[in-house]
Amino acid sequence: MGLEVDHLQLCYRTLRGDVKAVDDVTFNIDDGEIMGLAGESGCGKSTLGNGLVRMDVRMRQLGGRVGLDGKELPISDTKAMRNFRFKEVSIVPQYAMSALNPTRRVGKMVAELLKSRGFDYKSALPELERRVKLVGLDADILKRYPIELSGGMKQRVVMIISTLLNPSLLIADEVTSALDVSTQRAVGEMLLEFRDRKFVKSTMVITHDLSILAQVADTILIMYAGKLAEKASADVVIGSPLHPYTQLLISSLPEVGVRHDEHTLVGIPGRPPPLLNPPAGCRFRDRCPFAFDRCAEEPPFVEVKPGHSVACWLRVEGVSPVGGAERAEA
Amino acid sequence: MRRYLVRKLIIYVLTFFIAATIDWLLPRMVPGNPVSLLLAKMNLQPQTYNATYNLYMKAFGFNRPWWDQYLNFWRALLHGNLGVSIYDFPKPVTSVIADYVLFTLALLIPAILLAYFAGNKVGAMAARRKSLDNTVLPVGYLLTATAYPWLALLLAFLLAAGGIGHFFPISGGFSYGLIPSWDWPFIWSLVTHWFLPFLTLFLVAFGGWAIGMRNLIIYELESDYTHYLEALGAPSRLVRRYAYRNAMLPQLTGLALQLGVIVGGAVVTEVTFAYPGLGYLIFQAVGNDDYFLLQGIFMFIIVGVLIANFIIDIIYVLVDPRTRVGISGV
Amino acid sequence: MTVLGTGGATAETGAPVAAAGAVSTTRKRFEFLYFALRNKKLIIGLSVVLLFLFIALFGPLFVQHSMLAYGPPFRPPSATYWFGTNYFGQDVFSEFVYGLRESLFVGLIGGCGATVIGMTFGFLAGYKGGMIDEGLNVLCNVLLTIPGLVLLILIAGFLHHTSAVIEGTLIACTTWTWAMRAIRAQTFSLVSRDFVGLARLSGEKSRSIIVREIAPNMSSYLFLVFILLFGGAILVAASFDFLGLGPSNGMSLGIMMEQAADWSALPLHLWWWFVPPGAAITCVVGGLYFANVGLDEVFNPKLREL
């Protein structure tokens, strides 16, 4: 059954007003699916991921609902969510490097955490050690202090802890951002392994790095300025994207083996719109090389091909832009 | 762990050495001759002046070359000989101190310990409850901004001199009419005379500790490991326990650093209440130009503070498990 | 007497107050001002301090009776004698005003002096590291262990004669230690940043790097340190003066309390003699501490309440 997000709206309350970080977002993640959530900094992906587990004090849910395995997930009710956290919904946070209590040995912290949630450490220990070895770490890591571990080791330890109770939904927030390439690959394989061994059912991998998604994700969801831009299976998004933003993202990725004089890297000029008072219409309009007058109205996020949804008038209408040709040479 | 303690020990020995040297140096840097200043107060006849002068110079060793005096100083010091009181000549400084030491210890130790623990508890509670915080914060700051002599005068006025009532005696260590002996009236007299000075020291120190702990706990409650625990649904019990444990470390270090301040406060408080402790003795010694007594008390206080520091270091090692593994958490 | 906690927001004991942000641009300055005007703690604290500053500066204009004139003794506060008269019949209000000036003056010298010493040693230790750092650390440790007031008593006891400036300087020399620790820690974290490495590579001299690259980035932090040192100096000076070690011919808040204690203010219930000076100290120092917390919130966005 997996995760069902329905017209979810999350905002941050600031002194200057409400920042709509997640603006009317709808999608599903099935059991056994690894969905990548990608976008540039500030697009709302971290807010979405974190909001599903633990809403920050400044966050508010303005609308929509979330369902997990058929049940309602009461994300704005901190107390009610406690029953779901760790057991059904879990997160590997962006700050995994500092997520462990510096004055506790790893094993001790896990033991106290489990005990506080009503689980017995002793009976969980064999499985814990098994998983530790599975990710390539030594079992005696449990006797160490966090400061004795390297960044990659801490990342893996946190991933093990977060998935220890086999949650239904795992949210991995920027798990590879602070790592070197080989450790990135190892972590990516961990995510696949966890899914294959049924440690977790559905996974949401939040990142700005599309290359890791190419490795692990089944589907990719692209977010831009608080709204969904495109969703499709990973190869389609990377190989034949439909949304102009996705296309520019992919083309701005450097390819191994391709030299600069053969193929110039193209960035995307401009900046995303502010989310405090977002402009009307398509949020990508100002930076889009294909923008035309219809874009003044916000495009709906609809399925244009089986398993492929886009929010772009170009694809929805199938209308060739008139007068947009001048901007096409971006 | 051993390395940590040994290193601290070396620093303390070095500190002792330098402090003792400063102590020895100070009277010799004063313009004028301490002996002539002393004799000036004695109203001697001109005939006896020279003889008395020579006697004192010889008795205090001022007629020897300075390096000889310095070595003598150390020789005497290491034998526990702190010299002879000038004012109370020829009573040795150590026996003068012995009469006053217990009163100060009876004041300092309970005040420091109680203020520390009570302050920590209240500060930790205030960090969690906004309603309590709104009282604790201003009260704590006001208390810690209070000058010791003022609070002493205020309490003396209100509770001893009749501002509100005559609940406590206004000065002294015990009733002047009583002969010191271990019977109930004397002990009770000791207690009533002890209470107001104790209260003064306690209140000011309490304010400081409470504020400090509050800030430390707030800092811990906003740390990444706290957020991670909360994301995994840990009850606030566990979060609080970790925060408290981690906040204790800098608080302990702070205790060591604050000892000097509290000792200073004790001096002023004792003088206000004419409480016969070391602080009062210092005051008398300054008034009497009794250099050797001053020097002796100073050395005594230094040794006391160093010992207290070392005890705190040992406690720190016990509280911070990382030091046992050879990692310095400081 | 001082606020504690090595990790907490204020301290005389070496607390790293939350670090200042990056180099200020004009926009950031306006942002600071915006938050500064809205921060209750800062407003309240600053207002109290400014009030007493006003009294200190312009008080003499309101003083009706000379401090040296002897009028009727033991009078409680009234219309003629706003703070009453003391044992000798002197006007307590005029004593208060001049005493406040002196106390603030000594506190200012002590605070500035301690800040300068703390900055110098802190920057040196943090930037140079190595043996200089170790040496300064030892010096710092020695001074930290010796109770400041006791050392002051010792020095003053041998000096026999102090003036306001000497007193301020002495206080500066004995209270800089925690400031050095805190500044050193901050300097460490800045030194490892890239812009310092860049400055080094381009051949800038150490002193120039410290003054032009590091210090401006810590300016808000340094200001907070100064506020705490200023408050602390006032408190130390009060105790110092109370013990009779203050300037012999002067008047200060501590001296007022000393005289009150010496001349039977307690048994005679002359509360107006010692309550105002101590209350003023508590208000000024408390105001400084409050303002310090408020400023900390202004400079560090994470602490701001919404």
Image (cartoon, coloured by chain):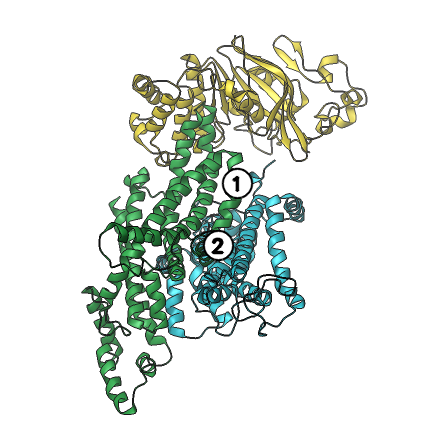
Chain colours: A yellow, B green, C cyan
Q: Nearer the viewer, residue B328 or B298?
A: B298
Q: Residue at x 44, y 34 (%)?
A: A98
Residue C74 higher or lower than B104, as above or below: below
Residue B221 higher or lower than C157, as above or below: above
Q: Residue at x 48, y 37 (%)?
A: B126
Residue A132 higher or lower than B259, as above or below: above
Which chain is indicated by disc 2? B
Which chain is indicated by disc 1? B
Whether labels 1 and 2 share one chain: yes
Residue that mark 1 sits on:
B135
Q: Earlier in the sequence, mark 1 or mark 2?
A: 1
Q: Nearer the viewer, residue A285 or C106?
A: C106
Would residue B212 be visible to someone looking at this image?
Answer: yes
**What element does badge 1 sit on?**
helix
Would residue C203 be visible to someone looking at this image?
Answer: no
Is A307 left or right of A140, judged from the image as shown?
right
Image quarter of residue C174: bottom left
Residue that mark 2 sits on:
B163
Give amino acid for label 2.
Answer: Gly
